[in-house]
Image (tube, grey):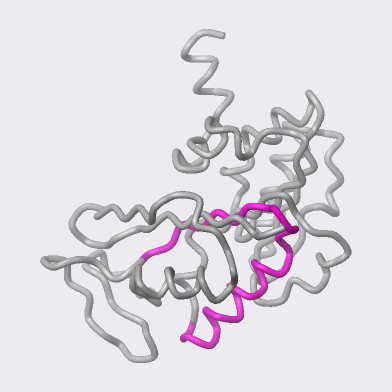
């Protein structure tokens, strides 16, 4: 492949997801779920690779429009992928998916849309409940930024950020506590980057015991 062909194959996937793939954590055979899949951008390389075998790909989103876009993308890149694998569903209620567990669950830019701490905890429990023993949970979420970045408290753990968005924000220490309470192994150190001096995004990668 030329470099241009490689970039086209990788599509619009988050560079942090690609990092996990490059390190062998998302290689086939694997049953993969993207929670909050949006238009399917983070599933693009996996859908393309599905034709080579070894990937069973699922995606959920609370938005019917988003699920429709993901189904259309799957139909274009992996025609044999069942449309039923992509469904309307919230992260806090994954009972319909508990007929099986997943080798890897992706949750990118979802948890910071929690209404409050109870909603955040419910979504996190939902995610963890469908990770199989030995499986991986990969999360990217907005967290409380460091000094110099505005974060105006709105109540119930929500903040207005410098870019005008409203997010539910936790501290890195909250993620450490959650890791311990779930009995999980932190696969990578927590990695937080400041984005345009307006918000902070943290990568949280866990392994379920067993």
Residue 131 lies left or right of residue 41; in this view the side is right
Q: What stretch is highlighted in magenta?
A: 115-142
Camera-side residue: 34 or 74?
Answer: 34
In the image, 178: left or right of 159?
A: right
Task: Give the image quarter of residue 41.
Answer: top right
- In the rendered image, the quadrant that contains the C terminus is bottom right
- In the rendered image, which quarter contains the N terminus? top right
> In front here: 81 or 176?
176
Residue 180: image location, x then y, percent: 51, 71
Relative to 123, say whether 188 is above or below: above
Image x and y of residue 164, in percent: 27, 69
Residue name at image x 38 percent, y 58 percent: 202
Residue 64 on the magenta segment: no
Residue farthest along the top direction in this orientation: 2
At horizontal 75% and vertical 45% (from top left) the residue drawn is: 57
The answer to whether 94 is drawn above or below residue 131 in the figure is below
- The vertical placement of 62 against 74, above or below, is below
Quarter where residue 159 is shown? bottom left
Residue 184 vs 151, above or below: the answer is: above
Residue 67 location (% of width, % of height): 70, 56
Residue at the (47%, 60%) spot, across then down: 109
How many marks on residues? 0
Q: Which residue lies furthest to the left in this view?
A: 148
x%, y% of residue 48? 69, 29
Q: Does the magenta stretch include residue 130?
A: yes
């Amino acid at each position: 492949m030329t470099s241009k062909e490689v970039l086209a194959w990788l599509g619009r996937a988050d560079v942090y997801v690609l990092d996990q793939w490059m390190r062998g954590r998302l290689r086939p055979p694997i049953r993969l779920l993207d929670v909050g899949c949006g238009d399917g951008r983070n599933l693009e390389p996996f859908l393309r690779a599905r034709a080579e075998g070894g990937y069973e790909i699922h995606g959920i989103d609370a938005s019917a429009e988003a699920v429709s876009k993901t189904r259309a993308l799957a139909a274009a890149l992996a025609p044999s992928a069942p449309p039923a694998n992509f469904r309307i569903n919230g992260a806090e209620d994954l009972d319909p998916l508990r007929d099986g567990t997943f080798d890897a669950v992706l949750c990118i830019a979802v948890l910071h849309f929690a209404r409050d701490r109870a909603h955040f905890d419910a979504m996190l429990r939902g995610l963890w409940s469908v990770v199989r023993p030995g499986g991986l949970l990969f999360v990217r979420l907005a967290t409380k930024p460091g000094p110099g970045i505005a974060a105006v408290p709105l109540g119930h753990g929500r903040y207005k950020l410098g870019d005008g968005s409203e997010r539910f924000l936790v501290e890195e220490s909250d993620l450490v506590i959650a890791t311990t309470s779930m009995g999980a192994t932190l696969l990578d150190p927590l990695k937080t980057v400041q984005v345009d001096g307006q918000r902070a995004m943290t990568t949280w990668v866990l392994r379920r015991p067993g």
